[in-house]
Image (cartoon, rainbow, N blue to C red):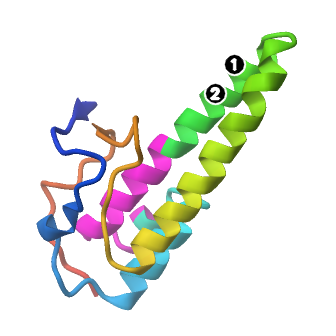
């Protein structure tokens, strides 16, 4: 079930998670921005890892749909293609930096959607 959060994309949501998120969870959360399923496999019970898996999955879906749409529109699609790529790369790098620094901020515009539930889990980082 998809739901929308009420937080601003500038708000750091890290206070919801265990403050002692271990180094492995931070690294796998950062890797999750390259392959979104890695945090779900490595740390399935960690709220922090699930949060970043959700954000990276949203970014992946946004980029996939945007690039497919841009590729399907003649002429205008080429103009839309470059901003979509820049958006995806910049916010992917932003997510990696935030995950490594133990912060949790939404991806602008799409980050309030929740596809992978992370609030219901207790943080059992190990």
Q: Residue 112's quadrant in the figure?
A: top left
The disc at residue 66 is 2
Q: Residue 14's quadrant in the figure?
A: bottom left
Taking the spot 87% from the left edge, 13% from the top edge, the residue there is 75
Q: Which residue occupies the extreme top position in the image?
A: 74
Q: Report the side of 74 relative to 106 (left or right).
A: right
Q: Is residue 13 above or below residue 45?
A: above
Assess whether residue 12 is covered by the magenta stretch.
Answer: no
Question: Could you tell me residue 82's position as x and y percent?
Answer: 76, 36
Taking the spot 34% from the left edge, 51% from the top edge, the residue there is 106
Q: Report the side of 14 relative to 84 (left or right).
A: left
Q: Which residue occupies the extreme right position in the image?
A: 75
The residue tagged 1 is: 69
Look at the numbered disc 1 and give the secondary structure of its residue: helix
* Magenta segment boundaries in residue numbering: 40-58
Depth check, front residue: 66 or 42: 66
Q: Report the side of 92 relative to 106 (left or right).
A: right
Q: Is residue 38 above or below residue 79?
A: below
Picture quarter with the C terminus: bottom left
Q: Residues within 10 Å of mark 2 (few under 14, many from 20)?
A: some
The disc at residue 55 is none
Q: CA distance from mark 2 to mark 1?
A: 5 Å
Taking the spot 40% from the left edge, 62% from the top edge, the residue there is 40
Picture quarter with the N terminus: top left
Q: Please tell me how many numbered marks the rendered image carries.
A: 2
Depth check, front residue: 76 or 57: 76
Taking the spot 65% from the left edge, 53% from the top edge, the residue there is 89
Look at the numbered disc 2 and give the secondary structure of its residue: helix
């Amino acid at each position: 079930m998809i739901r929308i959060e009420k937080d601003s994309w500038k708000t750091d949501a890290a206070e919801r998670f265990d403050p002692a998120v271990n180094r492995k969870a931070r690294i796998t959360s950062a890797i999750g921005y390259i392959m979104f399923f890695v945090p779900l496999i490595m740390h399935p019970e960690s709220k922090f890892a699930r949060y970043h898996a959700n954000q990276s999955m949203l970014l992946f879906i946004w980029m996939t749909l945007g690039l497919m749409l841009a590729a399907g529109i003649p002429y205008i699609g080429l103009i839309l293609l470059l901003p979509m790529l820049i958006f995806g790369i910049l916010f992917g790098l932003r997510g990696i930096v935030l995950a490594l620094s133990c912060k949790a901020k939404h991806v602008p515009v799409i980050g309030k959607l929740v596809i992978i539930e992370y609030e219901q889990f207790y943080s059992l980082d190990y």
